Amino acid sequence: MPRTWRFLAHDPSRVRQLSSDLSVSPLVAQVLIARGLGEQAGEFLNARLTGLHDPELLPGVADAADRIVSAIRSQRRITIYGDYDVDGVTATALLWHCIQLAGGRVDFYIPSRLEEGYGLNCDALRQLHQEDPQRLLVSVDCGIGSVAEAALAREIGLELIVTDHHQFGPALPDACCLVHPRLPGTNYPFGELCGVGVALKVAWGVCQRLGDGKKASPRMRTFLMGAVGLAAIGTVADVVPLHGENRLLVKYGLKSLVEQATPGLKALLKVAQIDERAQIDADDIAFAVAPRINAAGRLGQARLAVELLTTENADRATALATYLDQLNKSRRTVEQRIFKEARELMASRPDWHDSPALILAGEDWHAGVIGIVANRVAEHFARPAILISLNSQAAIGQGSGRSYGGFDLHAGLTACGMHLVSYGGHQAAAGLKISGDRIDAFRVDFCRYVGENHELVPRHTELQIDAEVRLCDVTSHAVKELDRLSPFGHQNPRPVFVTSRVELAEPPKKMGEGERHLSLRVRHHNTTLRAVAFTRADWADQIAGLREPFSISFAPRINRFRGNESVELQLIDWQPGAAAPATAPTSALTGMQSA
């Protein structure tokens, strides 16, 4: 389905007034107003870390912090039970650092993605309790759906604290303590924290108790300021909305990564080739840092990622970061192979082409990578997609799904749960286990449910345009001023603009590993800029064949390379001829004023 360009409406008089009040360009003012931030614009632009809510307000933090401090003082072993994704790994490392600095006996347990799967599992709980019946177990980024596991912990006498942010079911686990920003009957001011955000609040509560009850000691306060960097990584990687507390954590966490990076983070930034930058942005985390941490978990070695983030040994950190970099390269190779096989499977089944959802299964598809491929399949075929990894030696397949167009994936799995061994997740992403002989029946019922409960309409693929501009106005000064709206990410995207009737200055070129990306230079009047379209190498021949000017939609950014800065356009979409918006702007800004 072609994307519809929808210009966000704006009131020119309000734009002028806000521009004057805040001493920002009219374009920045327009973006703020269009995104519903007009009344809070000053607060948004000048947000302070003091805007974080007191941890005592988060349901369960007080009880959890009391229990952890008691265990620290009595020298009981405290085990952090984390998830294997970036959110879980950073949350594990953050809470580990806190307890270790406080003098506690602390270790961690990360289940194997390939052998144990997501969340708490009974075998692990029995093992941990047998090793040390007096230990305190604290989950991070998992556990809110572990009803049976929590019942087992209580039965065997294992003290369990659950800290999580995921969607919970009709019954809550009977743990000793639950920490969750959206617990029923509670009213925390910001319910969109991810797992590491919740872990930071717990650590903050612990630090308060180890200080004067309200303020942490100078040593622990320094730890908390550095811990915001870990929180930023997990928050960006988990694709939670970047507003409210999440935006504060990322905004100040990015600064912390530059100023207070641990040996492990320094080594990771170096292998990602962003260690010499004066500033790091959310895209650096999303595309350079997070994939390397995630690769360890996807390939069954998440413990190494936690070790990297907790080690104080610089040589060990370098070795681990180098290894994670190699794992990430392997992950990319596996991902490309599975995506190719998924497309070949679709080509062999024309009867699936009109299906409202896709359920694809393959022998020996790597269970740790199929989630990434499911996202690519969903975007490529414009519908919800679930990929299932089958193994000839196992009767149970592992699946991972991604939504498309706002479909509630978790609700769909719930409706078809009779076919599944287990499942979990949320609206946009979920995992499952299924017997191989149930896949066909599951496919029929799941596709029926999607067809009856979801309709893909133009608004699902609309591209919201902040303004129409000339390329000559997309200056370095203007882009840096727009960066005041950062950090950019989910629900706070980079501003998107349109320039009509550009021409090719040079033929498009495919680039990157596997030639998956596209590079081109476009000219508008006397201005020529480079544009890059990630994973859209398929546009190369189409654009090269254009004989008339065309229109582009893009997000501008500053490309920093070897000390040099230049404006670069991230190409999002294009249309032949002049721009054809769904609704014309009331007064297009055709000139970006940049003093």
Image: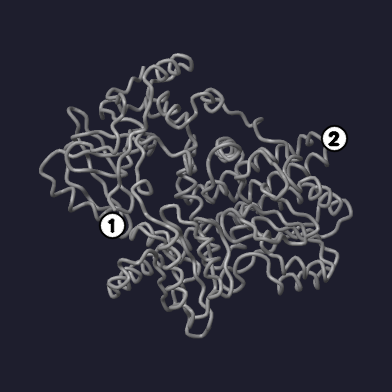
Amino acid type for the residue under numbered disc 1: Glu
- Considering only order in the chain, which callout, 2 or 1, is on the residue closer to the N terminus? 2
Within-10-Å neighbours for mark 2: few <14, some 14–19, many 20+ = few
Tell me, yes or no, if residue 323 can be seen here: no
Question: In the rendered view, does 394 fall on the left or right side of 457?
Answer: right
* Res 134 quadrant in image: bottom right
Q: Do the residues labelled 1 and 2 touch (CB within 8 Å)?
A: no
Mark 1 lies on residue:
515
Tell me, yes or no, if residue 174 can be seen here: yes
The secondary element bearing badge 2 is classed as loop
Quick one: 221 or 411, which is closer to the camera?
411
Mark 2 lies on residue:
212
Within-10-Å neighbours for mark 1: few <14, some 14–19, many 20+ = few
In percent of width and height, residue 106 lies at: 76, 57
Amino acid type for the residue under numbered disc 2: Asp
In percent of width and height, residue 307 lies at: 63, 58
